[in-house]
Amino acid sequence: AQSVAQPEDQVNVAEGNPLTVKCTYSVSGNPYLFWYVQYPNRGLQFLLKYITGDNLVKGSYGFEAEFNKSQTSFHLKKPSALVSDSALYFCAVTQTGGNKLTFGTGTQLKVEL
Amino acid sequence: EAQVTQNPRYLITVTGKKLTVTCSQNMNHEYMSWYRQDPGLGLRQIYYSMNVEVTDKGDVPEGYKVSRKEKRNFPLILESPSPNQTSLYFCASSLAGGENSPLHFGNGTRLTVT
């Protein structure tokens, strides 16, 4: 069975500081990893994905994520946070040939002035 | 505009009264799916469909039905809703499902069953 863990319910960061939202995963085969963002009263929006290749993946709005196979992690990062980045972030995983995407429980990011 | 449209956005009903939440996408996507979002549990998949007339259970299918009679529509049916189905529901679609197709989500339907 595949699973995703987001160990932090909430992350607080000051505007302009770097941010990290953590994600670890478990799959039996090769992982395919995604980050989605949810703004209030909206559906989830795709940010970025890791399929294969370079371990550092760049996505929308200046976000990037680092895939680490040995630590089974896929942490979301941004060098300089904005107040408008405040939202709920979800990590998700599937595997080769998988039709089901398993989501983590979400991490609320709060960026303050 | 490419989008996934769910209706209604808000729904309050009583236990046992059948209801349908509609979902439509205009992107000619093969894959469609329903999720429920609950605090502390993230998103859990209810049902998914790889193509017309092809549906399969997700992680929490009990108490729900779906149909996929045409590519663009994927309604979620609660034959006899119960209070534990009070939740925020999302419909999503993607080009082909699987690892290479990011999901496009609707704006959600908040269901309350009393």
Image: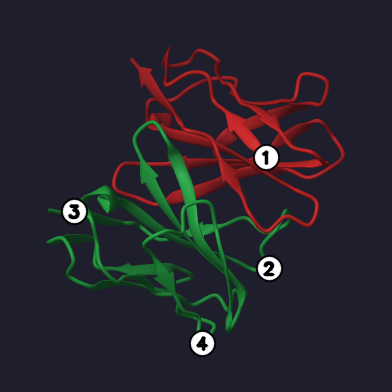
Chain letter of the residue carrying label 2? B
Along the line of sight, the residue nearer the viewer: B85 or A41:
B85
Which chain is disc 4 placed on?
B
Task: Quickly name the residue at label 4.
Answer: B70
What is the display colour for chain B? green
Instruction: State yes or no: discs 1 and 4 in contact (Cβ < 8 Å).
Output: no
Q: Which residue is the site of mark 2? A: B96
How far across and how far down the image is residue B114, in percent? 12, 53
Where residue B3 sits, quadrant-wise, is: bottom left
| Residue A77 x, y percent position in the rendering | 61, 24
Foreground disc of the pair 2, 3: 3
Name which residue type carries label 1: Gln
Q: Quadrant of residue B32?
A: bottom right
Which mark is in front, 1 or 2?
A: 1
Cα separation, mark 4 vs mark 3, equals 28 Å
Q: Amino acid at mark 2?
A: Ala
| Dot 3: chain letter | B
Mark 4: amino acid: Glu
> As drawn, which residue projects farthest toward the bottom?
B69
Give the mark, 2 or 3, whose residue is nearer the N terminus. 2
Q: Which residue is mark 3?
A: B112
Return the mark for residue B42.
Answer: none
Q: Give a yes or no on whether discs 1 and 2 share a subunit.
A: no
Colour given to chain A in the rendered image: red
Q: Which residue is mark 1?
A: A2
